[in-house]
């Protein structure tokens, strides 16, 4: 079985496990929309009992220039969600400047977007449950300042759907969540009008679900569809429109919803609720969907993030307060979880890894995701930009996961380039490991060399581990210039 499992591979095992658990209970998949999710946020999401997370993957950060890709964060995100037993849903938008097409609709290079979507789906094949194609295209703010255009978004959605199907046929494709609004002008198009235009009569959609954002504003979730219809119960109106347009069986995904405790501008102060009401309304909304809205298959609370600034409007919706303390809403949602799915999926994921994965090797940094630490921005064609985009960049940290490091010795293996100094140090979980040896051959500036560092027993731990690399404090030259540069790639831990 172990040999067969390794031949099949962990991505296939993970995909089969995720598919089996996705619809294992009645009611919606309970999820949370994260913002810049790190290890602490994902750990908290799992501990609360959420089964999935939604996270924006910004195109402009992954591909800031054509063909120039940075995979470090999404690679971490996928690995971390697997470790914590969380299904991952990626929202793909925020285009780079080079892909924008002002004055056009869609206001971006559609072919380039399709290539990006396909590349992401192919890279994480079997490891990401679903992809959301864009966000709130009925707002000019999300449509590069252009007047929202349902036909233009339909074109983008078709391309994005086909790109996912090519990259990962098993992944789900979700049409962008629509912002609830009754406006119809250059700044916004009513979500109801937009939905009718997006689903012409007689045309069957090729995607798998339609996302919506039924924010409750200041009203309880069971408030009737008055208040200009800006209530959580707007879900029933969206359901009716889909049925009228010939798509009665298309599932609805709530990829954002919530209530805010502040801050708010004076004109939006009517939307504020107390922390106690926020908790009660969120819990009631979950119960209401379970009880009366079976067509809602996915329900994601907005938001869970590292502690946001107190004056950040998004902080008011957060399940964690600006001081880092959990709000009553987080406790109330924890009590709504019928089963601790995170614990179940973590246990089953661990079993899958034993059967299907090579547990003797853990990838920390991919071969195609080089990191360059440097005192200078000077670079040649085959050099990456300094880590973080600017110099000096003197340290790099990464989180990786081990289920059971055991008492064996491990080797930290990495490929290096441009290494000149003998005092570039590596730290594991805060303990200094060793200096990276200078073993490159001339020309040192263009040759990748593999180095091995021995990891003593006890330095690695089960769960999250931290790797840190620091440049040496090299003495200044006669010209008072400080210069050191090293590139790292294909960093991994191998059990001896």
Image (cartoon, rainbow, N blue to C red):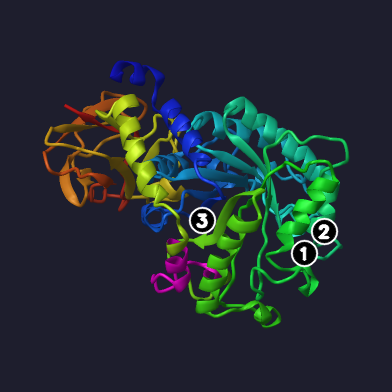
Residue tagged by mark 1?
A: 181
The front one of 359 and 238 is: 238
The front one of 446 and 190 is: 190
- The total of numbered circles placed on residues is 3
Q: Is residue 321 magenta?
A: yes
Task: Mark 2 or mark 1: name the one nearer the start of the chain.
Answer: 1
Is the residue 10 above or below the residue 400 in the image?
above
Please report the residue visible at 73 percent of the width from the left and 53 percent of the height from the top.
Answer: 144
- Kindly state the secondary structure of the residue where label 3 is placed: strand
Is residue 488 at all visible to an observer of this figure?
yes
Is the residue 240 above or below the residue 66 in the image?
below
Residue tagged by mark 2?
A: 189
Q: Position of residue 472 (x, y in %)?
A: 23, 47
Quarter of the view holding residue 153: top right
Relative horizontal placement of residue 15, taking residue 296 as reference (left or right): left
Please report the residue visible at 43 percent of the width from the left and 41 percent of the height from the top.
Answer: 72
The CA span between labels 2 and 1 is: 7 Å
Pick the quarter of the image with the C terminus. top left
What's the magenta region?
A: 315-334
The CA span between labels 3 and 2 is: 26 Å
Q: Nearer the viewer, mark 3 or mark 2?
A: 3
Q: Position of residue 237 (x, y in %)?
A: 78, 58
Is residue 416 at all visible to an observer of this figure?
no
Residue tagged by mark 3?
A: 32
Task: Mark 1 or mark 3: name the one nearer the start of the chain.
Answer: 3
The front one of 435 and 481 is: 435
């Amino acid at each position: 079985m172990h040999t067969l499992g390794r031949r099949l591979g962990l991505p296939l095992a993970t995909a089969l496990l995720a598919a089996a658990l996705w619809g294992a209970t009645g009611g919606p998949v309970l999820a949370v929309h994260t913002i810049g999710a790190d290890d602490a946020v994902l750990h908290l999401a799992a501990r609360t009992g959420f089964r999935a997370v939604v996270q924006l993957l910004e195109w402009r950060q992954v591909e800031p220039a054509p063909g120039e890709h940075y995979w470090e964060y999404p690679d971490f995100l996928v690995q971390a969600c697997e470790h914590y037993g969380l299904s991952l849903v990626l929202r793909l938008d925020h285009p780079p400047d080079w892909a924008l097409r002002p004055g056009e609709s869609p206001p971006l290079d559609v072919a380039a977007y399709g290539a990006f979507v396909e590349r992401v789906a192919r890279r994480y094949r079997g490891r990401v449950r679903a992809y959301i194609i864009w966000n709130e295209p009925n707002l000019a703010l999300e449509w590069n300042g252009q007047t929202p255009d349902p036909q233009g978004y339909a074109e983008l959605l078709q391309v994005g759907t086909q790109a996912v199907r090519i990259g990962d046929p098993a992944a789900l494709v979700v049409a962008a969540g629509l912002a609830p609004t009754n406006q119809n002008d250059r700044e916004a198009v009513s979500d109801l009008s937009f939905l009718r235009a997006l689903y012409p009569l007689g045309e069957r959609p090729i995607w798998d679900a339609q996302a919506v954002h039924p924010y409750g504003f200041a009203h309880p979730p069971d408030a009737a569809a008055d208040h200009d219809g800006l209530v959580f119960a707007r879900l029933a109106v969206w359901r009716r429109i889909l049925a009228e347009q010939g798509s009665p069986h298309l599932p609805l995904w709530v990829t954002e919803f919530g209530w805010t405790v502040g801050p708010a501008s004076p004109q939006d102060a009517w939307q504020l609720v107390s922390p106690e009401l926020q908790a009660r309304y969120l819990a009631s909304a979950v119960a209401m969907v379970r009880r009366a809205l079976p067509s809602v298959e996915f329900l994601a609370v907005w938001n869970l993030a590292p502690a946001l600034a107190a004056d950040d409007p998004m902080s008011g919706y957060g399940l964690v307060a600006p001081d880092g303390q959990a709000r009553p809403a987080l406790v109330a949602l924890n009590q709504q979880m019928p089963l601790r799915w995170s614990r179940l999926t973590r246990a089953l994921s661990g079993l899958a890894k034993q059967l299907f994965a090579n547990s003797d090797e853990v990838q920390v940094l991919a071969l195609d995701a080089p990191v360059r630490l440097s005192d200078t921005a000077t670079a040649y064609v085959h050099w990456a930009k300094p880590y973080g985009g600017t110099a000096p960049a003197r340290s790099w940290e990464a989180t990786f996961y081990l289920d059971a490091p055991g008492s064996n010795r491990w080797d930290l293996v990495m490929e290096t380039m441009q290494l000149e100094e003998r005092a570039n140090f590596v730290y594991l979980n805060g303990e200094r490991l060793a200096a990276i040896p200078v073993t490159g051959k001339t020309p040192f500036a263009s040759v990748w060399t593999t180095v091995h560092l021995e990891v003593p027993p006890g330095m690695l731990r089960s769960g999250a581990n931290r790797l840190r690399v620091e440049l040496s404090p090299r003495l200044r030259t006669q010209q008072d210039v400080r210069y050191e540069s090293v590139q790292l790639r294909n960093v991994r831990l191998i059990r001896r």
